[in-house]
């Protein structure tokens, strides 16, 4: 195959993927999206002859629009525009999970600080305020008191961007100091790890410690359902254990569409980029351009 990699920066994740693709004998076309022009009808020359595009852009705004252009050009893209649009926005993400019957934290949204404060008070303390668009645990706030809530809400109101006028509020899930990241391809887990931290945020990007995690049947079922809910593809599904370690009870708080996997690759005895390429070969191998 000729696999096009859409990127704005080559990180370790992309290096692992590129190395595996080349070792398998696939042609790779690296496409720096910062240097491309996207016409409404004709694809950039860099896309010519590509069998599948893999979106590895850091910026959510680029991901959402690039996937739409790819599909307009008739080129398969991982992940699809539908999946990118749902996963890039926490409101859409939560609505999709809820509609599919996937357990997810209680969530409410408001558009004014007064109504947001009403939600916070009804949830009780602590609860969590998240940006509608964002990753790596940035701009998230754990609200421990009314005074803290008033201050954070006021700050968001003055930030200016319209997305900060959408107040996305979730119950605080008392997880056991860790959450679970699963990388999956069309709902089939590639590998899973725990991310453990003394801080309430347990993102690997925030310095959490990682360790391999063995998924039970319930976790696998939820990963498959969550994947289907957002449109499938190469995803990172994040779960929290709601009854303590080993309880077998989970809530899915997010599905990520441009998932990073370098930390997982180091934590598990699985060749994660190899499994991803296996999936690409099966899913898109029959589209090879002669």
Image (tube, rainbow, N blue to C red):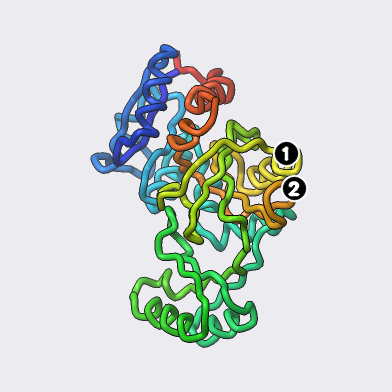
- Does residue 284 appear to the left or right of 154 in the view shown? right
Residue 255: which numbered mark, if any?
none
Q: Which residue lies under the disc numbered 2?
A: 248
Tell me the residue at 37%/79% (across/down): 155
120 sits left or right of 39 in the view: right
Q: Position of residue 98 (x, y in %)?
A: 69, 59
Q: CA distance from mark 2 to mark 1?
A: 7 Å
Whether the residues at callouts 2 and 1 have beta carbons within 8 Å, the answer is: yes
Image quadrant where residue 25 sits: top left
- Residue beneath the point at 36% across and 36% down: 6
Task: Give percent across and percent down for residue 276.
Answer: 52, 27
Asked where in the image residue 20 lies, by quadrant, the reply is top left
Camera-side residue of 195 and 182: 195
Q: Earlier in the sequence, mark 2 or mark 1?
A: 1
How dense is the environment of label 1, judged by Cα within 10 Å: few (below 14), some, or many (20 and up)?
few
Asked whether 33 or 177 is in front, the reply is 177
Q: Secondary structure at mark 1?
A: loop
């Amino acid at each position: 195959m000729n696999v096009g990699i859409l990127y704005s920066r080559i990180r370790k994740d992309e290096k692992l993927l590129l190395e595996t693709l080349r070792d398998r004998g696939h042609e790779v076309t690296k496409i720096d999206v910062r240097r491309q022009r996207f016409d409404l009808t004709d694809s950039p020359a860099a896309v010519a002859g590509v069998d599948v595009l893999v979106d590895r852009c850091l910026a959510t705004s680029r991901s959402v629009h690039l996937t739409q252009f790819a599909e307009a050009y008739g080129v398969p893209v991982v992940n699809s525009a539908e999946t990118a649009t749902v996963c890039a926005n926490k409101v859409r993400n939560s609505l999709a999970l809820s509609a599919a019957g996937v357990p997810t934290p209680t969530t409410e949204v408001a558009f004014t600080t007064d109504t947001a404060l009403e939600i916070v008070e009804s949830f009780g303390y602590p609860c969590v305020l998240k940006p509608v668009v964002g990753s790596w645990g940035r701009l998230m706030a754990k609200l421990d008191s009314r005074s803290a809530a008033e201050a954070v809400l006021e700050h968001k109101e003055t930030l200016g961007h319209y997305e900060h006028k959408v107040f996305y509020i979730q119950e605080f899930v008392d997880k056991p100091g860790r959450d679970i990241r699963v990388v999956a391809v069309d709902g089939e887990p590639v590998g899973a790890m725990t991310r453990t931290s003394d801080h309430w945020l347990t993102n690997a990007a925030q310095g959490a410690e990682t360790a391999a995690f063995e998924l039970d049947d319930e976790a696998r079922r939820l990963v498959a359902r969550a994947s289907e809910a957002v449109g499938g593809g190469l995803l990172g599904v994040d779960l929290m254990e709601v009854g303590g370690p080993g309880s077998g009870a989970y809530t899915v708080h997010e599905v990520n569409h441009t998932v990073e996997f370098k930390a997982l690759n180091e934590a598990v005895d699985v060749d994660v980029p190899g499994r991803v390429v296996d999936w690409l070969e099966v899913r898109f191998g029959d589209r090879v351009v002669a």
